Structures are given as structure tokens and as C-alpha cells.
């Protein structure tokens, strides 16, 4: 089989490595891929948002199955276009991908169908928003409506911070048109849990839970990033919590989307907070999370391609989705200065790894025989072990062997999970 994966980050590298385990896969094309992904797939210089070029490539190269991984092409209708061209594809169509593409849509969906989430208000007029935060409870959470590379959320701990966030989103357009509308919602407390779930629009099969570390620096300090590391499973996600989430959040969300004429087939990401009042939805994503994918997929024992095909064909109910009972830790090596200003072009030297360790390349390019940094988040070092403590230790042991003079990482990935466990 010829497989095409749209995207070029660490998440896509993890998906590609897992798809390669299927013996029927002859070749995987990555559009555009990156310098590290080139070790595992044929990289093609077509951007993830160039829908016409993606479809033309798939048709001309007789692609048997496509996976659209990032949010932008999903929201832009890449799956719709590929399906129209006769290419079977994993990922939601555009009218379902709106669950991530618009926070206003997703919040209104939850309100309409009684899915637990934070109380909120929506604003398109900055003066009204500024007036609201004068009396809103502090801290408060301000979210850009549209896609913002996972960074369009500000937790304002003072009224001044809230006003600054509104000015930057709505006037300065730091997130482009994504900030034309904003959601201002109550600040929830409790441990966060990420749950990725396979769904074919009817059946929901959650993957193993994980814990993301969003802030740039140790102790959850500094600005929000796309994610500085993950562990799986998440110790706060007990069997009782999982059962409650399935009953009150997962199935109701999928049923709500179908009722709205927006059947969701693909990977639906649930960003949850386990509050004193029970689990609530912080956010939805219409795709595999990054870097959650880098700890979840190494623990998947079932064949990924088989599961994906069951999702896209509506046959997930009869397909086994099995995970290992081991633990995994992913440590992100990022460029110094990320997520604001950083420099690229530094040489990367990667150590040898064993079968329980993977180095996923998120932002790198080839320069002859050299691999150079080419992004904010550069590498994801994932280790699998019998217990979380061992997985964390092994991930850091490997990360410390990487040569990357401009790199940095958080040193406390997994600390909270280990304390809870």
C-alpha cells in the first residue's frame, strides 16, 4: 500500500513510525515532512495547507490511504477534497473539524447538549469585552476563537492582564483573524487530562490517557507553548473518571455532532480538567494532539492502519483497540527562546536508541549529511518502560545524549504524575 501523511512535525513522525509497522505498507509519503522524518518516509515539498497540490499528488501517485494530521488542512477541507477525488482518508471533514476550528462553536455545542464545561461569554466587540472583564472573576481565561497553533489561550491572573490579552488578540491581531471573536470563561481548577479517542461517528474508543506540560519552564512557569512534554497514562484519570467521561462527555459529544449534521470520523481530542464538580471539557481538538501522540502511539499494541481504516469506513465497533499496560514519557527539546524569539540552523547529533526509545523529529532540515534545527520544538524523546519513574528516567537519559547547543528542555516532565501515583 502507498500511504500519504499530511504534516511535518513530531506528531506526524510518530504516526509514520507506527504506520510503518504494518507489513502491507510499501511506501509512506510525508507532505511536507522534515529532515528527520526523511529517515522513515519520502518527503515531498508540498505544504500542509496547499489542498489542491495535496490532492493532485495523491491522485497522480495512486495513494491507497491518506492521513491528514494537522488542524489547518482539516479545517480547510483537505479530507473533503481527498474523498471527492476518490482517496480514502483518516480525519474529519471540514464541517466536523469546526469543533476545533471555532471555540465559539464548540462552547455553544456543549451548552446546547449539556456537556460539562466552564461557564463562558463570547465577544466580537472589544469595548464590550473590556467592560466584562472589569467585573469578571479573576483569574479568568481568554481564548481566541480560531486556530492559533495551540497558543491562543491566556490565563489572566489580574484585570490588567485580561485587558492586555484582549487588546493583543482583538486589536493587535497577534493570532490573525482567530482573535476577531474571543471566549472569556471561568477559570477551572484541578488536574488536566488529555484523552485522544478514535471515533467513526458512532462508536468511541478512547486511547490511553496522557498529561501534557504546556508552560515553557519548570514548575509550570512561563508562556504557553505547543507542549513541552507528556507522560502516559495520566494517574488522575482513574477508571471511575473514565466511565464518567464516556457517559457525560465522549458519547454525548459524538452524538451531538451527528445531530448537528457534522458526523465526526477521525481522532477527537478531549482536553479535560478533573474539577471538584467532576470532569469538564477545556477544549476539543479535531486531530491527534502534539506531543500527546508521541507517548500514546508507542503504547498502542493494535495495528494503527487497521484502526484508522475502521474509523474512516464506519466499522470501528468490530475493531480491537488495545494498549500496553506500560508507561511512556516524552521530553521535548526546543530552541532557546521558544515560544517567542529563537534561532535555527544548529546542528543536531542524535544518539543510538533501543527498541523502547524513539526520537521524533519535529523541527529539523537536512543540510548534506547534517541535520539542523529548523523550528521552535525540535525533538521529542520518548521512552517506554514498565513504570512511569523508569520511563521518565530513560527519556531524560537519552535527551541528555543529544547534541544540540541551542536546545533546552523542562527538567520536571512527569513530576506531578509521579507525585500523584
Image (cartoon, helix red, strand yellow):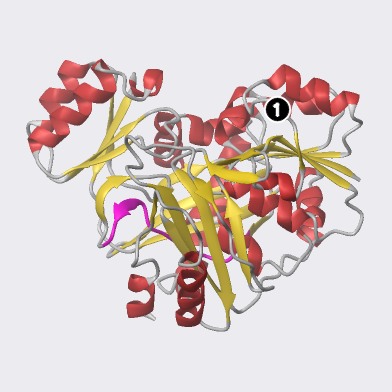
Q: Number of callouts in the render?
A: 1
Horizontally, residue 86 falls left or right of residue 50, namely right
Depth check, front residue: 378 or 50: 378
**Magenta-highlighted residues:** 206-218
At 90% from the left and 49% from the top, the residue drawn is 26
Horizontally, residue 217 falls left or right of residue 257, namely left
Q: Position of residue 233 (x, y in %)?
A: 51, 71
Please determine whether, in this image, residue 388 is positioned above or below residue 55. below
Q: Position of residue 48 (x, y in %)?
A: 64, 29
- Quarter of the picture holding the C terminus: bottom left
Horizontally, residue 65 falls left or right of residue 232, namely right
Near mark 1 (Cα within 10 A), the count class, few <14, some 14-19 or many ≥20, is: few
Magenta stretch encompasses residue 87: no
At 82% from the left and 56% from the top, the residue drawn is 306
State whether residue 201 appears in this view.
Answer: no
- In the picture, residue 130 is in which quadrant? top left
State the residue position of label 1.
45
- In the picture, residue 23 is in which quadrant? bottom right
Please determine whether, in this image, residue 402 is positioned above or below residue 117. below
Depth check, front residue: 140 or 167: 167
At 92% from the left and 54% from the top, the residue drawn is 24
Please determine whether, in this image, residue 44 is positioned above or below residue 185. above
Please determine whether, in this image, residue 281 is positioned above or below residue 107. below
Amino acid at each position: 500500500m502507498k500511504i500519504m501523511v499530511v504534516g511535518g512535525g513530531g506528531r506526524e513522525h510518530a504516526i509514520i513510525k507506527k504506520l510503518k509497522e504494518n507489513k502491507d505498507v510499501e511506501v509512506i509519503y510525508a507532505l511536507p515532512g522534515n529532515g528527520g522524518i526523511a529517515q522513515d518516509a519520502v518527503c515531498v515539498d508540498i505544504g500542509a495547507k496547499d489542498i489542491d497540490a495535496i490532492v493532485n499528488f495523491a491522485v497522480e501517485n495512486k495513494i491507497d490511504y491518506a492521513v491528514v494530521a494537522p488542524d489547518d488542512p482539516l479545517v480547510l477541507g483537505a479530507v473533503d477534497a481527498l474523498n471527492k477525488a476518490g482517496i480514502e482518508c483518516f480525519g474529519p471533514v471540514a464541517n466536523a473539524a469546526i469543533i476545533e476550528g471555532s471555540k465559539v462553536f464548540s462552547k455553544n455545542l456543549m451548552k446546547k447538549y449539556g456537556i460539562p464545561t466552564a461557564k463562558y461569554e463570547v465577544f466580537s466587540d472589544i469595548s464590550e469585552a473590556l467592560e466584562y472583564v472589569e467585573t469578571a472573576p479573576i483569574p479568568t481565561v481568554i481564548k481566541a476563537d480560531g486556530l492559533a497553533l495551540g497558543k491562543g489561550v491566556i490565563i489572566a491572573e489580574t484585570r490588567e492582564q485580561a485587558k492586555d490579552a484582549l487588546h493583543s488578540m482583538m486589536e493587535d491581531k497577534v493570532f490573525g483573524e482567530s482573535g476577531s471573536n474571543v471566549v472569556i470563561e471561568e477559570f477551572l481548577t484541578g488536574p488536566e487530562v488529555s484523552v485522544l479517542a478514535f471515533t467513526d461517528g458512532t462508536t468511541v474508543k478512547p486511547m490511553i490517557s496522557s498529561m501534557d506540560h504546556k508552560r515553557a519552564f519548570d514548575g509550570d512557569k512561563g508562556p504557553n507553548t505547543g507542549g513541552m512534554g507528556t507522560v502516559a497514562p495520566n494517574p488522575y484519570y482513574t477508571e471511575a473518571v473514565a466511565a464518567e467521561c464516556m457517559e457525560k462527555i465522549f458519547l454525548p459529544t459524538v452524538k451531538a455532532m451527528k445531530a448537528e449534521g457534522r458526523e465526526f470520523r477521525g481522532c477527537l481530542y478531549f482536553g479535560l480538567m478533573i474539577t471538584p464538580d467532576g470532569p469538564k471539557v477545556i477544549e476539543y481538538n479535531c486531530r491527534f494532539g502534539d506531543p500527546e501522540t508521541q507517548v500514546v502511539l508507542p503504547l498502542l499494541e493494535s495495528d494503527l492502519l487497521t484502526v484508522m481504516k475502521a474509523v474512516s469506513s464506519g466499522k470501528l465497533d468490530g475493531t480491537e483497540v488495545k494498549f500496553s499496560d506500560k508507561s511512556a514519557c516524552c521530553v521535548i527539546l526546543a530552541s532557546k527562546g521558544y515560544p517567542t524569539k529563537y534561532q535555527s540552523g544548529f546542528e543536531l547529533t542524535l544518539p543510538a536508541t533501543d527498541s523502547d526509545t524513539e526520537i521524533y523529529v519535529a523541527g529539523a532540515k537536512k543540510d548534506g549529511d547534517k541535520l539542523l534545527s529548523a523550528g521552535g520544538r525540535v525533538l521529542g524523546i520518548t521512552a517506554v518502560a514498565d513504570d512511569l519513574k523508569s520511563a521518565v528516567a530513560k527519556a531524560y537519559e537519552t535527551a541528555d545524549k543529544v547534541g544540540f547547543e541551542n536546545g533546552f528542555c523542562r527538567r520536571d516532565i512527569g513530576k506531578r504524575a509521579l507525585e500523584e501515583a
